[in-house]
Image (cartoon, coloured by chain):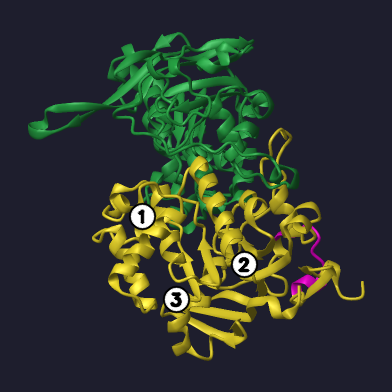
Amino acid sequence: MNKVLVEVHNLKKYFPIRGWLFKTVGYVKAVDGVSFCIGEKETYGLIGESGCGKTTLGRTILRLIEPTAGKVIFDGTNLMELDSRELKRMRRYMQIVFQNPFSSLDPRMCVRDIIAIGLKAHTNLTDQEIDQKVLRLLKHVGLKEEHMWRYPHELSGGQNQRVAIARAISLDPRFIVLDEPTSALDVSVQAQILNLLKDLQEKLKISYLFISHDISVVGYISDKIGVMYLGKIVEEMNAEKIWTDSMHPYTQSLISAIPIPSLEMRKKKRIFLRGEVPSPVNPPSGCRFHPRCPYSMDVCKYEEPKMIEIESDHFVACHYVTKK
Amino acid sequence: MSQNDVLLSVRDLVIHFVTYDGIVKALDGVSFDIYRGEVFGLIGETGCGKTVTSLSILGLLPENARIISGKIFFKGENLLENPEKLRGIRGKGISMIFQDPATSLNPLYKVGDQITKVILTHQNVSKEKARKKAINLLKSVGLPDPERIMNFYPFELSGGMQQRVMIAIALSSNPDLLIADEPTSALDVTVQAQILDLLKKIRDERNISILFITHNFGIVAEICDRVGVMYAGTVVEIGSVENILSNPMHPYTKGLLASIPMPGRRQKLAIIRGTIPSLLDPPPGCRFHPRCPNAMDICRKEKPESVEVEDGHFVACHLFRRGM
C-alpha cells in the first residue's frame, strides 16, 4: 500500500436542532464516528444514499464544516488543531469539486478569473504569469484558449465541471474531495470527466475522496470503497472486489438494486429493502440498518456492531456476518 | 405483433420552439409505435427531445411550441387533429407521472382529496365510492395503512411514497397508456428498485402500456420490452431491449453503451467525442455526424432514413442504407 496521506479518526459532526428560544432540542447525527485512511495517489470511494452524511463527511474533513469531535491527520498534521492562518496555508494542498458546476462557479466571473482565484490568494504571480498558468491548466483539463474569457453560462455542464477541476488543481494540491462530480452530467459526459480525473491523478499524483451514490461509478474509479449508512461506514473493501465479495447486507442490497445495462443482469434476483432510510435525528438503536435488514437478529436491535477485519483490507460492521 | 395491437403511434413528428434566440428545432421527424401491454422506453441524454415527445402526446406543450408536422394516433385516432377529444383522453386514456413527485402533488391538499378529485372528474361515481376506490388504489401501489395515508399532506410522505401516490392517481381511471417521465430519477437506488418493481407489477396485472422515459440504460434493461434511442431530436435506433443491448448498431447507441461504467470493468471508458449540438442550429444531414467515428460524406448532406436491419430492429444511419 502507498504511504498514508489522509487519516480520519472517529470523526463526528452533530448538527443541533434548535427549538423554542434557540434551545437545542436534539441533534442530527450526520457523521457519527467515521474512521478511514487514504493513501497517496489513491482514490477512496464513498457511497451511500441521500442523507447518509457523505457530503457532510467530505466537507468536515476539509474543515469547511467544523467537526463536533475527531481528528483528521493530513500528511502528519492534525487539521483540527490548526488556527485559521495555518489552516489557510494548508488549504492549497486540499481542494474540493462540487456536484453542480452551475452553482459552484460564480456566474459573474469569467473562466480565467474563476481559475485564478486560488493563485491570487496563495501566490505572488503577476497577471501575465497567471494568464499563462491558467492557459496551461485549461489544456490539462481539455479546454482551449478560447474558453478563457467565457462565462459559466456560455459553457455546457461538462465544460463547467472541467473549469471547476482546473480551479481545484491550480495550486498543485495533494488531495481533492470530489463530491458527486458527475451526478449532474449525462453519461457520455460523465465518461469524459471520469477519464479526465484518472489521467490527472496519474500525472499530478493526487489523492481523491470520491463521493457518490452511484456504485458503478465508484467501483470504476476507486481503489478502496467505503459504504456509508446513516452517518457510519458499514463496510470497507478493495474496489475490485465490491461486485463479488461484499458482505454487509446493505452493500449487497445496494448492488442488487442498481439497474445494470446487461442482459445477464436482468435475470438476477433482487434483494428488496423494506422502507426507506430512517431519519438521522433518532437513528435506530443497535445496528442502524436493522429495521431494513433482511437478516436482522435480536442482537442487532440493542448492540452496535463493531468494524471487524474479515479478510485483509476488508472491514465489515455486521453481527450477521461475524456470526457466520 | 400485428398492426391491431398498436396502441399509440407517433409518425414523423416535427416540433419547433420559438425563443428569443431563434427557432429551436427540438424534434426532427420522430416516429415510433407502442403496442398494447408493453413497456416502451425512450432513452437519450439531456435535451434530446424525449420529454417534448411525451408532452406532445398529451397536448401539454408550452405555448411557444409549434407542431410543424406529424401525426399521433391513439387507438387509431389522430390526437393532433382533434384537440377537443384530447380533453377526454388526458388523465383517462393516457395518464402521466413526472420526475419529481414533490412538485407534482399539490402541497395544500390532502393526498386523499387529490386522488378522489381525479376519480370524480373522470368517472360518474358518488363521493363515498370515490373514496373507497382511492383507498383501494393506495393499497394496490403498496402503501401501508392506506386509510391513514388518505389524510396525509404530501410533505408528510417520503419521496418513494409520494411517487407511489402519483402512480395511484395516474392509475385511478384505468388508463391504457401510462407515460412515466423519469419517474425514479429523484429517488435513491433502493427506493428506485421498489418503484420499478411496482411498475412491472402494474403492467402485468392491468395489461397497460407504459412509455418509459429515462436517461439510464440500466433502467431500460430492467423494465422495458422495446426501446427507442433518441439523439438531438431524432430517434436513431429502435428495437427490443435484447437487440439493442446485445447488438447495438447505431454509432451513438454503441458509444453510449461503451461509456457506462460496468461492474468489474476497470479499463478506461470509451467516450463519444464532442458535445451535444445546439438545436438552434443543428448539424445538417445526420445530426450525429460531427461526433460520429464513422462519418462519411453523405452523412453531412442527407438525413438517414430508418431501415429495418433485423426483425423489429430499426436503425437510422447511412452505414445501413437500404440494399447495402
Which labelled disc corresponds to residue B89?
none
Which labelled disc corresponds to residue B60?
3
Which labelled disc corresponds to residue B232?
2
The residues colored magenta run: B291-300
Image mark 3: chain: B
The answer as to whether the residues below labels 3 and 2 share one chain is: yes
Q: Name the side, left or right, on which A158 lies relative to B163.
A: right
**Vertical comparison of B83 with A66: above or below:** below
Front position in the image: A194 or A243: A243
Label 3–label 2 contact, CB within 8 A: no
Which amino acid does the dot numbered 1 rest on?
Answer: Ala
Q: Could you tell me how far apart the alpha carbons at marks 3 and 2 are, in whole angstroms?
A: 20 Å
Which labelled disc corresponds to residue B102?
1
The answer as to whether the residues below labels 3 and 1 share one chain is: yes
**Vertical comparison of A126 with A232: above or below:** below
Quadrant position of residue B119? bottom left
On whether residue A60 falls in the magenta region, the answer is: no
Front position in the image: A324 or A107: A324
Instruction: Chain B: give its colour.
Output: yellow
Q: Element at badge 2? A: loop
The label nearer to you, 3 versus 2, is 3
